Amino acid sequence: MTSDALTFRRARRDDLEAIIALLADDDLGQSRERVSTPTDPAYLSAFDAIQSDPNQLLAILEDDAGVAGCLQISFIPGLSRLGMWRGQIESVRIARRRRGDGLGRTMIEWAIEQCRIKHCGLVQLTSDKTRTDALRFYESLGFVSSHEGLKLAL
Amino acid sequence: MTSDALTFRRARRDDLEAIIALLADDDLGQSRERVSTPTDPAYLSAFDAIQSDPNQLLAILEDDAGVAGCLQISFIPGLSRLGMWRGQIESVRIARRRRGDGLGRTMIEWAIEQCRIKHCGLVQLTSDKTRTDALRFYESLGFVSSHEGLKLAL
């Protein structure tokens, strides 16, 4: 890992273009996203929905060159397990220029800490079964593949 | 299925005791929940957190005898997939007296419809890998087991 300063912070509107570029720069993401200037209005309204929901945290990891990573944490209240809150991690990306740098681990450890701060009893995420490297990575951080992740496209 | 009237509605505070009993009446749930009178304060604050979050829907299915089923839907805004909303289903239970009655299917179909109404592009849930009947059930409704569901207890 290089020694430059790393900062985690809540994403701002002017980070949006860089975040969308990160989401798109991915084997599965490239066919799902639309990188354009101006930014597609669908992303703008999604961003507003995230920012106006106090239980959503869209965060970026910033280094000297700009946005180096992003992820979203959803803090989900629930009755199950004695009213336990869950932290759910989604849309994790590391900029190509920083991959293999250990930054993914730093970022997920930061996310887990945010879940602790919010008194979550569980951190959860799903990962596409074809992302075998990602699965090994999360298991190395202590995550257990105890569940099937089922999706229904509407 | 019996021919009595079935109603879906948002859960109220006075349904809480019946919902907790449902959550507890389950192979995995029995060791995780606490059925007591008065209701454990942890459930009361979780219930308040759910009700005050416009992106959470804790719903019950009611028949002539009372609460026959429950589930929670979390509507999650996100940037990925062109700013797509997800509907996430959690804590699905059918009362023992109504199991094998087809009510689970009715309830999940209702939940999927709520996700459509909220313009979600995807409905998702995770199910413990030991719940093989549940997995077959969700697959019969069109869900695809494309993801691993990873959990980290804090």
Image (cartoon, coloured by chain):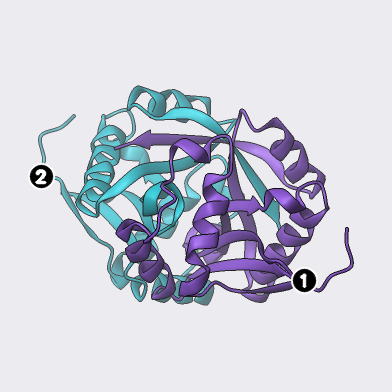
Chain colours: A cyan, B purple
Note whether residue A66 is visible.
no
Q: Nearer the viewer, mark 2 or mark 1?
A: 1
Residue marked by disc 2: A5
Give the image location of residue A36, x and y in percent. Answer: 49, 66
In the drawing, does residue B148 fall left or right of residue B1?
Answer: left
Where disc 1 sits, the SS reads loop
Query: Where does the N terminus of chain B fall, quadrant-wise?
Result: bottom right
Taking the spot 44% from the left edge, 23% from the top edge, the residue there is: A136
Which residue does the image show at 41% across and 47% down from the upper left? B34
Give the residue at mark 1: B6
* Label of residue B87 in the image: none
x then y, percent, for residue B42: 32, 57
Q: Nearer the viewer, residue A80 or A144?
A: A80
Are dots 2 and 1 on a single chain? no
Residue at 39 percent across and 76 percent down: it is B52
Q: In this rendering, does residue A101 appear at all?
A: yes
Horizontal side of A55 relative to B71 (left or right) equals left
Badge 2: residue crowd in 10 Å (few <14, some 14–19, many ≥20): few
Residue A148, position as x, y percentages in the image: 60, 35
Q: Amino acid at mark 2?
A: Ala
